[in-house]
Image (cartoon, rainbow, N blue to C red):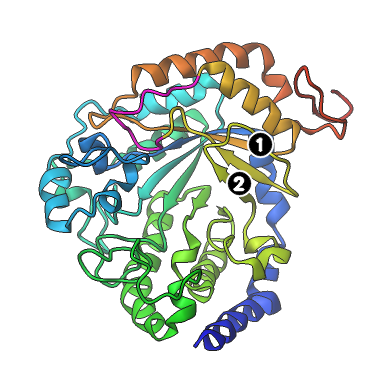
């Protein structure tokens, strides 16, 4: 069975290398120019899970609040009743969020259109599991897109193409549906992914989830919101062949959008080919960054959770992020710094103070960030060296 899975994925790799992927690389440098200049962006993890603040009933709080449904194995019916239907961000102000990013010196924003819990944070026509089920009847994704365009900030959308815990045909939910790709590691041999051990499940998931929800919703957000970046995640939860099929659609229909590496990067067979993406995402929550080849991005967060957690008070100082930003740029990367807004739609006061501290540093030092990169000089104990043109 494993050999069958390997052959299936190898066919998809060869299809990419012999045609569509090579064509998609022709305009890569042109479309990446703004991204390389920007160096600093804001990630926004926000969704209905914030209502619980990372804790479900008597369970221990989830480290990642956006993973609460999986962490506490919450049944979909309970999740809808207790979280989805109670989500009502009455104080949400898209322009204020974008203003925070702009004042801090961030040049692009990536916001969640759909995370692993499967709920679209916009009024999707493809699937009715979306923001219209909440008390809030607006379109925060549309409002943020408009605010970014007004302020000259590039706009990106995160979409969980592989994991989807509400969908009975998708990987991840093994407590309601006994599906593959969850904590129980069903249908997988030890140390292997389900789609390598049980490739017979692939056709059903491809037909009933990828074809009916994942690809149509990606097309929907592209047509509605025209993002500059598509940010994917958890590629190992789908076979490489399905991730490449999703990417092929994006490359052929929307050649101008920048795509991150978490569409294929867990798969070692594609490493020689830049992961078929435009840039590489490194580890979550870095306290230090290591240099990587080509274009890459680090994604720290202000405490330890990406989504809002009422129980995580481990916020870093602004200096943590200014040091990390300088070090990231000095090693040739971008920093996409995460904020987890509260359920009412407001940034946590401590997050605001962190942003204000970074703002003060950027007012004095932004020329060492924008358009800069690695100096090629040895690392120094006293700080970081960035380079722009002939200037250190």
Magenta-drawn segment? 305-316
Residue 312 counted in the magenta span? yes
Mark 1 lies on residue? 289
What number is the disc on residue 282? 2
The residue closer to the viewer here, 145 or 386, is 386
The residue shown at (17%, 57%) is 75
Asked if the residue at tag 2 contacts the one at tag 1, i.e. Cβ–Cβ closer than 8 Å, the answer is yes
The residue shown at (64%, 41%) is 35
Residue 191, given in percent of the width and then of the height, sits at 50, 69
Residue 82 counted in the magenta span? no
Residue 335 falls in which quadrant of the image? top right
Above or below: residue 367 compared with residue 374: above
Residue 334, given in percent of the width and then of the height, sits at 64, 37
Residue 85, given in percent of the width and then of the height, sits at 12, 45
Mark 1 is surrounded, within 10 Å at the Cα level, by few (under 14), some (14 to 19) or many (20 or more) other residues, namely many
Q: CA distance from mark 1 to mark 2?
A: 8 Å
Dominant secondary structure of the residues highlighted in magenta in the image: loop
Mark 2 is surrounded, within 10 Å at the Cα level, by few (under 14), some (14 to 19) or many (20 or more) other residues, namely some
């Amino acid at each position: 069975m494993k050999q069958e899975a390997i052959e299936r994925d190898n066919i998809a790799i060869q299809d990419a290398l012999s045609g569509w992927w090579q064509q998609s690389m022709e305009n890569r440098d042109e479309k990446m120019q703004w991204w390389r200049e920007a160096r600093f962006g804001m990630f926004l993890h926000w969704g209905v899970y914030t209502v619980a603040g990372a804790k479900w009933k008597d369970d221990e709080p989830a480290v990642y609040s956006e993973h609460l449904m999986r962490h506490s194995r919450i049944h979909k019916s309970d999740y809808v009743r207790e979280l989805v239907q109670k989500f009502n961000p009455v104080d949400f102000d898209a322009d204020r969020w974008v203003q925070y990013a702009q004042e801090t010196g961030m040049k692009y924003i990536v916001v969640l259109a759909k995370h692993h819990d499967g709920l679209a944070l916009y009024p999707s026509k493809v699937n009715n599991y979306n923001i219209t089920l909440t008390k809030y009847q607006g379109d925060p994704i549309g409002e943020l897109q408009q605010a970014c365009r007004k302020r000259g900030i590039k706009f990106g959308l995160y979409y969980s193409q592989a994991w989807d815990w509400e969908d009975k045909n998708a990987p991840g939910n093994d407590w309601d549906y006994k599906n593959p790709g969850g904590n129980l590691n069903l249908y997988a041999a030890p140390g292997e992914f389900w789609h390598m051990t049980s490739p017979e499940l692939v056709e059903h998931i491809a037909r009933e989830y990828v074809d009916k929800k994942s690809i149509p919703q990606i097309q929907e957000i592209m047509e509605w919101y025209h993002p500059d970046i598509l940010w994917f995640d958890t590629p190992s939860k789908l076979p490489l062949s399905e991730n490449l099929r999703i990417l092929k659609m994006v490359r052929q229909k929307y050649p101008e959008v920048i795509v991150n590496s978490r569409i294929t990067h867990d798969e070692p067979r594609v490493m020689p080919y830049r992961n078929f993406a435009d840039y590489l995402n490194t580890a979550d929550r870095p306290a230090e960054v290591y240099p990587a080849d080509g274009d890459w991005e680090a994604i720290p967060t202000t405490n330890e959770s990406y989504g809002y957690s009422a129980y995580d008070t481990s916020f870093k100082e602004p200096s943590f992020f200014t040091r990390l930003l300088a070090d990231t740029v000095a090693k040739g990367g971008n920093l996409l710094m995460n904020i987890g807004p509260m359920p009412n739609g407001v940034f946590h006061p401590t997050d605001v103070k962190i942003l204000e501290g970074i703002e003060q540093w950027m007012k004095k030092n932004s020329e060492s960030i924008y358009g800069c990169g690695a100096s090629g000089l040895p690392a120094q104990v006293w700080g970081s060296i960035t380079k722009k043109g002939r200037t250190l």
